[in-house]
């Protein structure tokens, strides 16, 4: 199993492949020109930022703090005990 920190060190195309193959889709949100999908992978949350105009992935990142999850907390319940507080 790969840690969130190790995940964030991978090249973006490998991050996306890993999440789309092994992650569990939880929710999405819209921010500006991006649709952001939230996944659960192993024991951490991962976001995939899809660019609307380019129809491609702009960013993939493992979330390593509570503050990264705040945009989701009004619409879904998340298990937060596994993430570091900031």
Image (tube, rainbow, N blue to C red):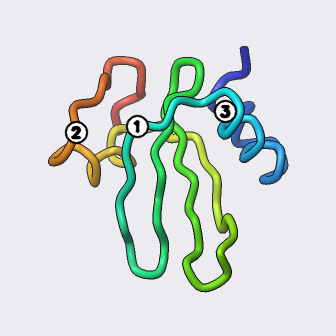
Mark in front: 3 vs 1 = 1
Q: Distance between the Cα atoms at labels 2 and 3?
A: 24 Å
Element carrying mark 2:
loop
State the residue in front, 49 or 9: 49
Q: The C terminus appears in which quarter of the rendering? A: top left
Of labels 1 and 2, earlier in sequence is 1
Tell me which label, 3 or 1, sits earlier in the chain.
3
Using the image, tell me which numbered label, if any, was put on residue 76. 2
Q: Nearer the viewer, mark 2 or mark 3?
A: 2
Which residue sits furthest left? 74
Q: Residue at x 28, y 29 (%)?
A: 78
For the residue carrying disc 1, how many other residues have a C-alpha within 10 Å: few (<14), some (14-19), or many (20+)? few
Q: Is residue 44 left or right of residue 10?
A: left
Decide: marks 1, 2 in contact (CB < 8 A)? yes
Instruction: Tell me if label 2 and label 3 are in contact, CB under 8 Å.
Output: no
Q: Which residue is mark 3?
A: 5
- Mark 3 → mark 1, Cα distance in angstroms: 21 Å
Kind of element beneath mark 1: strand
Task: Report which residue position mark 1 lands on.
Answer: 26
Indicate which disc residue 36 carries: none
Name the image quarter holding residue 29: bottom left
In terms of sequence position, does the residue under pointer 2 or pointer 3 come before the other?
3
Q: Residues within 10 Å of mark 2 (few under 14, many from 20)?
A: few
Look at 73% across and 21% down and name the residue there: 2
Secondary structure found at label 3: helix
Name which residue lies at 42% across and 38% down: 65
Q: Is residue 27 above or below residue 81?
A: below
């Amino acid at each position: 199993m790969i840690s969130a920190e190790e995940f964030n060190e991978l090249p973006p195309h490998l991050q996306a492949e890993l999440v789309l193959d092994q992650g569990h889709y939880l929710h999405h949100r819209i921010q500006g020109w991006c649709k952001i999908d939230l996944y659960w992978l192993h024991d951490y949350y991962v976001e995939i930022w899809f660019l609307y105009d380019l129809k491609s992935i702009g960013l993939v990142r493992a979330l390593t703090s509570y503050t990264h999850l705040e945009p989701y907390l009004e619409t879904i319940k998340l298990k937060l005990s596994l993430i570091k507080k900031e």
